[in-house]
Structures are given as C-alpha cells and as structure tokens.
Image (cartoon, helix red, strand yellow):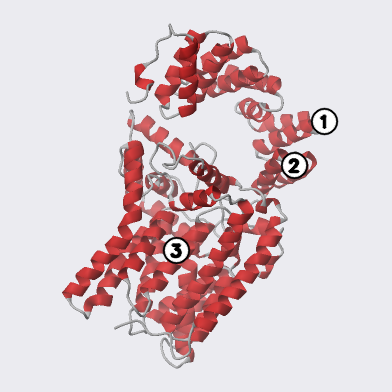
Amino acid sequence: MEPRAPGASSLMPVLLGVGLFALTLRLVFYLQLGETAFGQTAFLDAGFYDGWARQIANGDWLAGHEPFFVEPGYLYFLAGLHKLGADLPTVRLLQAGVGAGTAVLAALMAGRLSGNSWAAACAGLTVSLYGPLVHFEGQLLKTTLEVFAATGTLALALAPRWHPFRVGLAAGAAVVLKSNFMTAVPLLLLWGLWRSYANGRRAMATTLIWMFVGLAPLLIATATRNAVVSGEALILPWSSGINFYIGNRPGANGLDPTLPFAEAGPSGEGRSGKAEAERRAGGALGFAESSDFWWSETWPGIIANPTESLIRFVNKGRLLLHHYEFTDNVSFYFVRDRVPILSALFLGAWLAVPLTFAGLAGSFYRRDPGPWMISAFLWLQAFGVIAFHVIDRYRLALVPAGIALGMTALSDRIRGRGAPWAVLIGAILLGGLLAVAAPPPFGRHGQSMAGQHRMLAIDALQRGHTVRAIEELEQAVSLNPEVQNFHFRLAVAYRLNGQIKRAQASEQNGMRLDPIAGPLRLGLLLSLDEPLAAAAHCLNSASLGHRVGASQFCAGEALQRIGQLAAAEVSLSRAVAYAPGLYEGWVHLGEVREARDDLAGAQIAWQTALALKPGDSSLTDRYEALIQRRPDLLPLQSHRPGS
C-alpha cells in the first residue's frame, strides 16, 4: 500500500505560504542578530568549525592528517562557501534559507502523511515558529543542515512516487552531517522493501541496489579520505567511543556532558580522550583503537551498576523531553534576551513533545505504514541520543518529524478517523507532564549564564572594547564567584584599562579559590599583554610542581616574546624534558636556539618536532632553510619528501 496522496487540494499554495512566512521571520532574526556580537563572531564550537573550514578552503582539501573526529559534511559545506568568498553574515543568511526549507519539508511531510493541507499548514507554521531551530540557524554549526537533511530524507521516503536513489543519497548526506542518522538507514532499507514488495522480488532487489548506490558515495569518500591521511578507513567519526564514555562513565549522572581529564576547547575531547586511552592502555593506540577502548571501558561499568545506569538513562530521557534548552554552547535564552524576534518565536519543546506523543499514539490507529515509519524513526533517534549524552541541539532533528506526525494524528481525529480523542488527549497530557510539569533535571533556575558573559567578554577584549569586557566579566563573577577563570580574566581586563588595584584584588580573589593551579592559569591569560608578569607566574607554578612541563613552556614562550632568550631556552629545555611529546615546546626551543645562532641545537629541536608532527609543511620549510644556511648540518632523511 502506497502512502496517502496529498488529497484533492494541492499542497503547493501551502508550501509556498509556509516558506514565505518562515523566511520572513528568519530574515528579521538575521537582521537583529547581526546587531549583536553573536552575528559578528563565531563562538565556541562554531569558531572551531569556521577555522577548520577556512583551512580546507585555503587548500588543505583533505582537512588535516587525522581521521575525522566530527562529521565532515558541514565542514566541507562551510569550506565551499568560504572558497566562494562568503563571510559570516552570508553563511548565516544562507542558513536562514535552509531553515525556511526545513519548515517547508515539515509541511510536505505532514501533507503526505495526512493527505490534508490543514495538517500540512499547521506543521509548517509550527516549525517556522520554533525558536530553538531559528537560534541555531544563526550559528556556524551543523545543526541546521542536519535537521534539514533528516527532514528531507523522510519527506522523500513518503513521496507518492518512489525514488530509492534519491532517498539513499539524502540519507548519505544526513549521515555525513550527523552520524547518529545511521540508525535510520536500516529502517529506510526496510521501508524501501515494503514500498517495492507488491512489484515482486526483482523490484525489491532493484530498490535496495539503488538505495545503496545513493547512500554509498559520500560514505566511501569519507572512508577513502580517512585511509589516505591516516591508514584507517573509518566511515564514521572516531568520536563515538569517547562520546559514549562521556554519557555513561562511572559516576556520571547523565546531566553533565564533560570529561574530568579533557582539555578545554571543542576538539579537546578527542585529543584528551586518545591520550588518556593510551595512558590507561600503556601504549600507543590508533584512532579506531582509541574509540574501541572507550567502548570497552564503558560497558563493564554499565553492566556492573545497573541501578546507576538506569538512573543515568532516565535523567538523559528527562533532558530529551523537558522544555528547557540545556546547552553546552551558546545559550538560546542568553541570545533571546538580546534578539527581540526570538521572544516572538515562542514555540519550543513544551509544544513539540506533547504533539509528538499524540502522533506516536495516533500512528497505532493508521492502516498505512507511513506513520509507523516516522514513529520508528523517532524512537530510534531518541534512543540514539539518550545512549550518548543530551544537550539542546542534539534533539532538534526529531522536532519536524514529531510535529508533522502530531498534526497528522489531530487531523485524522478532526476528520472522524484515527485515534479516539481520549487517547490523543491522554498522550498530550503525558507529553505535557514530562515536558513542562515534571521537575527539571538540572536545577530549579536552569543553567548559570556566567559562562555566556565570559564568552562575550573575550570577544570584546579581542575587539579592543575593554570597558564592555569589564562589564560582562563583572556580571560573570556576580553570577558565579566560585570560578577562578572569571576572576583572572577580570583582572586582565582591569590591567588593560589601567585599574591596577582592582586587577590585583581580582587576582587575589582567584588565587584563593585554587592557589596551586592558579599561577599557571593566570600566567597563560597574561602571556600576550604582560609577558614578564606571565613568566613570573608560570615559573611560580613550576616551583609548586603543578603541570611542570606546561608551566615551563608558558614561562619560556613569554620570555622569548620579550627577548630574554637565554632564560627562555632554559625554561623551554625544562618544558620538553618534563613533556617530551610537547610539539610546540620543541618548535619554540628551535626558534630560540636559531635566534641565539645555535643552529645545531635548533636542528635537533626541529627534527624532534617533525618526528612528532611530520605533516607540518611550514616547519619543514624552515628546517630546510636552516640546512641551507649550514651545509655541514646533514638533513634527517626521514623528514625529506618521499622518504
């Protein structure tokens, strides 16, 4: 049985109306966001994506020398735009168009599920007004394209005329944008078999072949690229193991998606996870081996502590369903307070969750399996998100499908068929209880916005707006005075503004929170603006025995910057003695030795650095230039091209 046709009235006017409405709202958001720092700067993970994409656009089309830790789809999308000259506002404008397209696809999905233009219009308008979706369309993150691809794949699968190649191609795009869409691939294959079942086995086989033909190219390209740069033909990112550990590690409650040993920054999980896996395993590990290690490290804890595991799973389920937008990035609520249109885009999980519950209940009363397929997709994706860890943007791919399914169930009931009102109302009340009435799992007042103020302060400092930075950091300290970094950054801002006494008071307040780690943290923050003070703090940190390698490197880099080369060489030599794998330490040590005319010493330092990171073409060029200056220094063969 084929999915229902859209009905007698054409969906085209509905789709055009939804698209125009959604795009108008997003253009207003685009203009208002552009007046704030969020429209001018790529923060946190967005900055990570933007930097990597620019690296690709500047000629590194293989995107580095490691397998992908994140999905490559958005990286190459962004790199292509940068190659064409697109800046941040242009990317945001294009993503506004993609977001409007998602609203149109949700309307199309609802129309195909219900055969009713009313349901299609309601679904499209609801997605248009869904504030968190619009919020992420203003950020350089994969979320917007991920949601669009997932919604488009489902809409294609429900098309009256079956095109398995198109569905496979769309599914492949969705996977390289967000790898957990892979859980939907078997479902789509089963759906394809059902769509072609009436035409016999040959048609079923042809359907599977064409779906694989559509699905395979992007996955093969990813695996080939990974094999070329690293020798490991990974189809999916190697982050799965450490992400599984983050969400299910011993002692975790499911509400804190952080690692106790992770470095700061969006890529810190990968670097830290691999390093920690190698430390625990007692030897070097490949990227796939590192991921496998964390899978094997996590499962025994889950099995040995079933009660703790169940509590953790329930907590993550509560995060998935609760209306609060729990974030590890730029907060929806923080931006909403600064961008008026987001307050008008008032729809959120408080409506989407009850509608989805109604849709799931209503699907049991339908004879055609279209709603069953969408229901199965929602269950699979929800379980896939909960299995790892839950934050706001991870659940957004479920929203358009859930809304379309819910509007279909209501449309069926209004037309006198489908689930009884009692069933639908019961499902809506249950969804409302979980989304709104149940106590939030993260604290009565939600998340602290202190970190968001700190983020804006850093941006203000980079733009030279010191007074603005001080205002933001004072807000951060007042909201959370127990974070040492806030005090130290405020001290730096005070120093830049000439308020030395206030700076010293902030430094003392910060030091009281952690006198052991504090000197290094303060030294790192002062290194650019006051390198002499930074060197003193970092040397103090080393004398306390705190991260001696990093402390000596901090001091050496600062001393190098102010021209105290002899002292810098001492500190950098000590840094690499304590941390022989510190690539940057060897590079700077070579620079200092070269500046002191110790070319043989510089050669040794740079040889060691190249052994740690053979792909650094810039350092290779400097090394070769060093050899040309001193012919008696024989080049290391392993670093020469083709060796």
**Mark 2 to mark 1 CA distance (whole Å):** 14 Å
Quickly name the residue at label 3: 149
Q: Earlier in the sequence, mark 2 or mark 1?
A: 2
Quickly name the residue at label 2: 469
Residue at the extreme top of the image, as rendered? 632
Residue lying at 25% horizontally and 70% vertically, measured from the top left: 207
The amino acid marked with disc number 3 is Ala
Q: Closest to the observer: 140 or 278?
A: 140
Q: Earlier in the sequence, mark 1 or mark 3?
A: 3
Residue lying at 50% horizontally and 85% vertically, measured from the top left: 117
The amino acid marked with disc number 2 is Ala
Neighbourhood count class around disc 1 (C-alpha, 10 Å): few under 14, some 14–19, many 20 upward = few
Q: Closest to the observer: 10 or 324?
A: 10
Q: Is residue 430 visible?
A: no
Q: Is residue 533 above or below residue 369?
A: above
- Pinpoint residue 461: horizontal percent, then vertical percent: 72, 39
Q: Is residue 407 above or below residue 32?
A: below
Q: Secondary structure at mark 2?
A: helix
Residue lying at 65% horizontally and 66% vertically, measured from the top left: 27
Quadrant where the C terminus sits is top left
Neighbourhood count class around disc 2 (C-alpha, 10 Å): few under 14, some 14–19, many 20 upward = many
Q: Nearer the viewer, mark 2 or mark 3?
A: 3
Q: Closest to the observer: 541 or 210?
A: 210
Quadrant where the N terminus sits is bottom left
- Pinpoint residue 467: horizontal percent, then vertical percent: 80, 41
Neighbourhood count class around disc 3 (C-alpha, 10 Å): few under 14, some 14–19, many 20 upward = many
